[in-house]
Amino acid sequence: MEQSRIGWKATLLICTVILLAGAGALAVIFSTQPEATRREAAKETAMLVDVTEVRRGDYRPVIRALAKVEPEHDVSFKPRVDGEIISRSDDFTPGGFVSRGDVLVEIDPADYENTLARRKSELDRAVSDLRIEMGRQQIARQDYEATDGSLSDRQKALVLRRPQLRAARAAVKDSEAAVNQAELELERTRVRAPFDAHVLSRDADLGSQVSAGESLGRLVGTDTFWVEATVPLSSLRWLEFPEKGGKKGSEVRISHRSAWPEGVLRKGRLYKLVGALEEKTRLARVLVEVKDPFALEKNNADIPAMLIKSIVEARITGRPISGVIRLERGSIRKNDTVWVMKDGKLEIRDVEIVFSDAGHAYIRKGLEHGEKVVTSSLATVAQGARLRLKDHEEGGEAGSEAGTENSEQGG
């Protein structure tokens, strides 16, 4: 029993000695291993990069936004009188185009013609009554002149039949108004297009019995469509809206990738700023005015028609930003920095960005005209790292530089 305890202690002691010896050996190995220095490696091999030479100037930003197409004029087409439809224009059908003043449907006019005839007869009767009363006025005046003139004003008015004359004249005016109303209602049996329009729907046809205010169909104007776009609030100061002096709004190019061929665009102009933010996104709403949306004019025959409620992309050309450097957004690095190649070395610059659109950043400070900005991605980014241009490498200059470096290393 005593011997087994002694053996166990000896074994534990031996294991401990072995572990300590191994740890010491590892410490010696790591302390004598050579270190790799990044600075020396950077000096030995310059990184190949692409650069772009920047220029300071005046540039117009392009604000991109998704937008929805809406008609400027959109009405539910309704009659103003009751009756049966006895005729309909062939153009009054979904997809048709009509001109302002075209008769789209005609309601049976028989009842309204009869009403007009009655109102004209009533007018003739009222005019006849007025003439008879005017004749009586002459007789009444002769009777008044035969008196001694001692009548009061009220008695004088009664003797001269002035109330009867006013009533006769009022009856004539009422009859004339009734005739005008009957003529209007007869004219309204022919329901006309209120403007140049495209027919979206038709709700009544030949033989339909319609009432005043009942929908006959839906019409939208063909002169102008609105494209409602949403843009960030920070973009508003760079947008131009039309002014009373005749100044036009910013130009807008509209594309519809799913419906139009590649590269096909429609042009419009900024029209109005809507005075309320979009509820969900809290973006500003602007209206773009697009003329001839259905491409009906001869000079627009080769461009596509616009579809109501379609989602399109609007590219709005903003007002000029003066005295800035325009740089592609891909060249802007983390924390608004850029990489500049100067004297063959890398400089990391902080820049002041005035505005950024979908493709570019517009820089006020941090870069100078003519400087070269690195556009390549780098595996290692360090201030002062050596750089060389890829186009020089392809032309043989980089090869010469590499040979020099090799000879220096060999020496």
Image: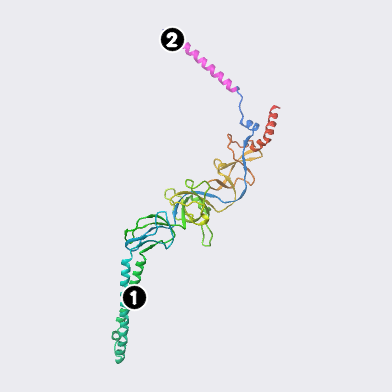
How many marks the image carries: the answer is 2
Q: Amino acid at mark 2?
A: Arg
Q: Position of residue 140 (x, y in %)?
A: 30, 87
Q: Nearer the viewer, mark 1 or mark 2?
A: 1
Locate residue 177 relative to residue 332 in the image: left or right: left
Q: Residues within 10 Å of mark 2 (few under 14, many from 20)?
A: few
Give me the C-alpha separation between circle 1 and circle 2. Answer: 138 Å
Q: What is the x, y in percent for residue 23?
A: 54, 19
Circles 1 and 2, Cβ within 8 Å, touching? The answer is no
Colour scheme in use = rainbow
- Give residue 336's position: percent from left, percent from top: 55, 43
Q: Residue at x 47, y 13 (%)?
A: 12
Query: Which of pointers 1 and 2 lies earlier in the amino acid sequence?
Result: 2
| On screen, residue 391 above or below 2 | below
Q: Quadrant of residue 178?
A: bottom left
Of 177 and 385, the residue lying toward us: 177
Q: Is residue 166 magenta?
A: no
Q: Residue at x 35, y 71 (%)?
A: 180
Q: Quadrant of residue 43?
A: top right
Q: Which residues are magenta?
A: 6-31
From the viewer's perspective, is residue 239 above or below residue 12? below
Residue 399 visible (yes or no):
yes
Which residue matches tag 1? 173
| Residue visible at 32% across and 75% down in the picture | 123
Q: Secondary structure at mark 1?
A: helix
What amino acid type should be assigned to the residue bearing mark 1? Lys
Circle 2: element type: helix
Residue 9 inside the magenta-drawn segment: yes
Disc 2 designates what residue? 5
Residue 84 x %, y %: 32, 61
Viewer-closest of 275 and 385? 275
